[in-house]
Image (cartoon, helix red, strand yellow):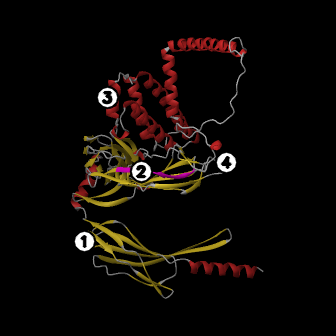
Amino acid sequence: MRTLILFVILASLSITGKAQAVEFTARAQSAVVAGDRFQLTYTLNAEGSDIRLPSLQDFNILMGPSTSYSSSTSIINGKVSREKIYTFTYILKANKEGQFTIPPATINVDDDKVSSNSVSIKVIKAEDRANQQQSQSNQAANGSISSEDLFIRVTPSKRNLYQGEAITLTTKIYTKVNLESISDIKHPNLSSFITQQLSKNEGIEWINENVNGRNYSVGVFEQKLLFPQKSGKITIEATDIEFLIRQRVARSRTSRSIFDDFFDSNYRTVKKKVSSKPITLNVKPLPSGRPEGYSGGVGQLNLQASVSKNKVTANDGLTLKVVVSGTGNHKFIEDPVIKFPADFDDFDPKVSNNISNTSRGMKGSKTYEYLVIPRHAGEFTIPSIKFAYFDPSKGKYVSSNTAPITINVQKGEGSEDVSSGVVRTNVNRENVKFIGKDIRFIKTEKTVLKPIGTFFIGSLTYYLSLFIPLSLFILLFIINQKRLKDNANITLVKTRKANKVAIKRLKKSAQFLKSGEKEAFYEEVLRALWGYLSDKLSLPISELSKDNAGEILSNSKVSDEVINEIMNILDTCEFARYSPSSGADEMDKLYKQTLTTISKLENQIKR
């Protein structure tokens, strides 16, 4: 029995190994120094033989191939899988500097020739030995680290751009010393931009790079996506980073001990603060003459519209889906304007984002889903949706229209046999009801005649007609007096109205607060506050920035305290979405602060 089980397992392993796709992969450093050694490694997930390298005219093969083998077996849900890896390692040396490509290598696997991928390698100039020795001797002598040994650079992807156009701000570290960690960072004030953090891998990937004849270890510290919200010359201040550096301490020969090398007593940790240079951007305003359908989009965008079904029955719901896709500033685009037929009931859209931040901007799609319920039978048309955006590469607005959508609505069970206010000729008059027109059928009921001698005066109806108006008058008088008394307290009235406005604005963010969705919460608070300011100041969101909003609020006799609270909330939302330290307490505190601030602003701002 045990022999049979062993045979089944071995057979399963054999079948799994044969069914696995063969992968032959080449890897090497992306940048090396001319004259230095580096490894070129090939990995194969199957047994192979007769590996052949391409012609390597620009490199010398110093050693190889050295071969290693590893394997692993796993059983998941009764399925046995086995993975084996063969590794072939070569030691190479670059002969000269430049950008080179190593062509694919080949290997035989089961009488089939398999090719690897090609490898691109940048060979940089070797640093002058005199400069290298001088730098090391200076550090050992006085313990100082110069600006040539460690510095940072903050580089924008472009310096001339349009308002709302995305740029990437990249911070790189250049070092010739051993970095332990970062103790402090001072980021520049980016109040003139809306910022998005680009996805970043754990840790810094270091490469070699030659700068002014000196070789550095270079790594990307962070990348941010910026969307300028105003035009003109905008200066981005310097970024300050304080590093902790592991430094060797020079010792005299008399005090040197053989145990120093074992216990690292001749090393110390020092701090070094470095700063980048300020950056000036030229942000051009968007051209005038914005076309119909423009909703703040900047980039290369596209709009499509579709319905879940074109044939429905009356009172049966359908979904209109509108998708804005492409590369641009999706999150800051306003909702499209859609004119539904008068016979349709429509509801606020459900908005979903499938967007990723890239170096060119936000890439992906933003989807609006409208629930629509036709109430009457007939053939209806949803007009074409006008959409326009600004394309920075062309320097002009681009407009497009979706195709009109025709909906065939059939009479549902128990529904009225009417269509868009038009009465059909075969409909009985008794079944027709008021449909929004000013024509009704003449009543055909029997006429009721009163006998002679019946008088209205003195009857019960007569006295009721006198008593009821008098009672209503007294009731309305009491209600009106109470209302006048309540309205006398102007501060109380304004505060109630302000609180209603604040709660309505922040209703959706409260839901995200309860569910603990941090990024969605901060984004919705930011969206609600900008939307509130847009409504109150009668300006579209695309033209609003912190600077002009603060100036307009100040001109509207809003106190400096309230203006500062608004600016602090906007700054907190922009930075806290990606801060790992922000938690539920901070989110709840910000929610309450935003409610209070909108209430104060509602009381102070002049409408």
User: Residue at image x 30%, y 67%?
Assistant: 122
Check disc 2 and report the residue beneath it.
385
Q: Amino acid at mark 3?
A: Glu
Q: CA distance from mark 3 to mark 2?
A: 36 Å
- Quadrant hosting residue 188: top left
| Type of amino acid at the residue the image marks with label 4 | Gly
Residue 417, given in percent of the width and then of the height, sits at 61, 48
Residue under the image location 32 percent in, 66 percent down? 32
Q: Which residue is mark 1?
A: 96
Residue at image location 50% in from the left, 24% down from the top: 497
Please give the label number shown on residue 130. Answer: none
Q: Are the residues flagged by discs 1 and 3 in contact, CB closer than 8 Å?
A: no
Residue nearest the viewer, comparing 473 with 462: 462
Q: Are marks 1 and 4 in contact (CB under 8 Å)?
A: no
Give the residues drawn in magenta, as a range: 377-388
Local SS, label 1: loop
Give the residue pinned by disc 4: 414
Q: Is residue 292 visible?
A: yes
Q: Is residue 311 left or right of residue 238?
A: right
Could you say where residue 24 lies in the image, as x and y percent from the top left? Answer: 45, 76
Query: For the residues carrying marks 3 and 2, which lies nearer the camera in this image?
Result: 2
Q: Residues within 10 Å of mark 2 (few under 14, many from 20)?
A: many
| Image quadrant where one finds the C terminus | top left
The N terminus lies in quadrant: bottom right
Secondary structure under tag 2 reads: loop
How far, Cα to Cα, is label 1 from label 3?
60 Å
Indicate the secondary structure of the residue bearing disc 4: loop
